[in-house]
Image (cartoon, grey):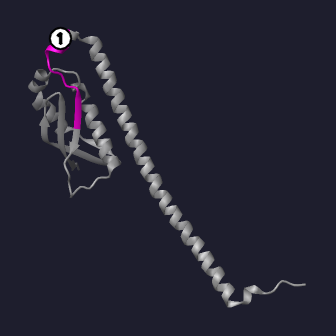
Amino acid sequence: MRVPPLYARKGWQRFLAGLSVGVIFGWLFFLMLFGIMYEKQITTLKEQKIEISDLKMQNQTLLDDKENSNNTEIEKTLLVKNIEVTFEKDKELPLNSLTRHELKKEIQSELNDLLNKDLGAISRTRSFIISALENKTLLIDDVKYGFEVKQFILWTTVEVELAIKLVQ
């Protein structure tokens, strides 16, 4: 008894060729979707790590200041409780979200000393803070970034809007 020569029939040849091409395209499509999903997961994890480290640093600063200061003194004055950093939209310098988050983390760590400080003392040194931010140069992925302060709002929440520029 012998096996029939199905490989010689044109119908079977087309079927097997279509099946193999379909498997290859399906595998490539799966790899592409898996890569996109994995990249989003990595970005989400890095954003969450940055947020966790910022919150830990802010919590430690607040706990240290609480131990060092008198409660009645705190109740009499307005203190900075939060720092918000935003970046101006720039069409000439498109940055990915991970780079933006790393820049935001660095700027917030620079401004972290303002937490739980008196608004009067901070307002007296406002020009110094702005010039310190504008003179700050950050190196991320072998690219140097500088900043220009567009808006600086000082209240219990310090809001800073920055324009990002490349530094040569």
Quarter of the image where one finds residue 84: top left
Quarter of the image where one finds residue 59: top left
- Of residues 150 and 33, the one nearer the viewer is 33
The range drawn in magenta is: 72-84
Relative side of 27 to 41, left or right: right
Magenta stretch contains residue 104: no
Quarter of the image where one finds residue 77: top left
Q: Is residue 16 above or below residue 98?
A: below
Q: Position of residue 71 (x, y in %)?
A: 22, 11
Q: Quadrant of the N terminus?
A: bottom right
Q: Residues within 10 Å of mark 1 (few under 14, many from 20)?
A: few
Q: Is residue 142 visible from the viewing direction of this image?
A: no
The residue lying at 17 percent from left, 27 percent from top is 156
Relative side of 92 to 51, left or right: left
- Element under disc 1: helix
Relative side of 72 to 64, left or right: left
- Of residues 102 and 11, the one nearer the viewer is 11
- Of residues 131 and 3, the one nearer the viewer is 3
On the image, numbered disc 1 is attached to which residue? 73
Q: Is residue 110 above or below residue 6?
A: above
Q: Is residue 78 above or below residue 5?
A: above
The residue lying at 46 percent from left, 55 percent from top is 37
- Of residues 52 and 121, the one nearer the viewer is 52
Q: Position of residue 138 (x, y in %)?
A: 28, 41
Relative side of 35 to 22, left or right: left
Name the amino acid, label 1. Glu
Magenta stretch contains residue 75: yes
The residue lying at 28 percent from left, 40 percent from top is 104
Q: Position of residue 113 (x, y in %)?
A: 24, 25
Q: How many marks?
A: 1
Q: Is residue 29 visible from the viewing direction of this image?
A: yes
Q: Position of residue 85 (x, y in %)?
A: 23, 39
